[in-house]
Amino acid sequence: MLRSCSLGSEGESKRNSMKRHLNSPLTVLVCLALFATMSTLSIGCNKDAEEPEAEETTGSEIPEPEPEVEVQPVEQPCVVETVYFAFDSSELDSSSRAALQEAVECFRGQGSGVSLLLTGGADPRGTEEYNIALGERRAQTVRSYLTSLGLDGNSISTTSMGEEMATGTDEAGWARDRNVSGSEN
């Protein structure tokens, strides 16, 4: 069973009011403006646009390559690597000698006078006086080796920190404390 539905007089007046609004000049103008805007936007989105043709060049019009820029290497400062010593020893091992030879070659390559400060250290085992003397012997050993390789001994000074800068608390740490470090003076 179907029922018919009637809007009655109130519904009829709303429908007539809506028809009047749709037929008003303002509504027509707004619709035309939207249509024109959408048409303009769709023209800019043409997917079938042709790509511009590449210009043909003759052999004489090939651009010359840019000249290569010559990069100058930056000189690294020469350093005397920290060298390490065995317990209660001031003798250089082969790896320490090799590191010191590299430093001397670098200083020679720079061609300028060098002024170095060598600082000897020791682990905290032993008396303070003994460790100061051991650190000085280690620094003097490095100085002697550097002068034997050609550096001017007058431009190399030595000092000892003994156990003053020691930080080790076990055998591995103490091995790091037994050293000579170098710095430009």
Image (spheres, rainbow, N blue to C red):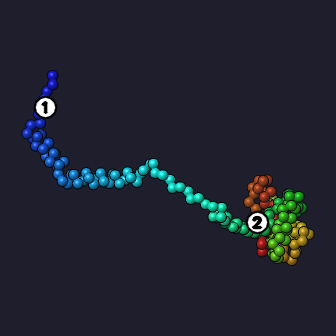
Give residue 160's position: percent from left, percent from top: 81, 69
Mark 2: give few (<14), some (14-19) or many (20+) Cα within 10 Å: some
Q: Could you tell me the amino acid type at mark 1?
A: Cys
The amino acid type of the residue labelled 2 equals: Glu
> Is 20 positioned to the left or the right of 82 in the image?
left
Q: Position of residue 111 (x, y in %)?
A: 83, 74
Of all residues, the one furthest to the left in this rendering is 9
Name the one closer to the observer, 58 or 75: 58
Q: Is residue 69 left or right of residue 53?
A: right
Residue 5 - label: 1
- Foreground: 99 or 109? 109
> From the image, which quarter does the N terminus lie in?
top left
Image location (x, y in percent) of residue 59: 66, 61
Vertical arrangement, residue 104 with respect to residue 88, above or below: below
Residue 161 pos. (x, y %): 78, 68
Q: Disc 1 to disc 2, how far (Cα)? A: 105 Å
Q: Residue at 85%, 68% (x, y): give it.
A: 104
- Name the residue at 81% across, 76% down: 112
Circle 2 is placed at which residue position? 164
Judge the density around disc 1: few (<14), some (14-19), many (≥20) Cα neighbours within 10 Å: few
The answer to whether residue 137 is visible is no
In the image, 7 versus 151, the foreground residue is 7
Q: Is residue 93 above or below residue 72?
A: above
The picture quadrant where one finds residue 124 is: bottom right
Q: Quadrant of the C terminus?
A: bottom right
**Residue drawn 8% across and 39% down?**
9
- Residue in front for this viewpoint, 10 or 139: 10
Q: Is disc 1 in contact with disc 2, using a CB cutoff of under 8 Å?
A: no
Is the residue 71 above or below the residue 43 in the image?
A: below
Q: Secondary structure at mark 2?
A: loop
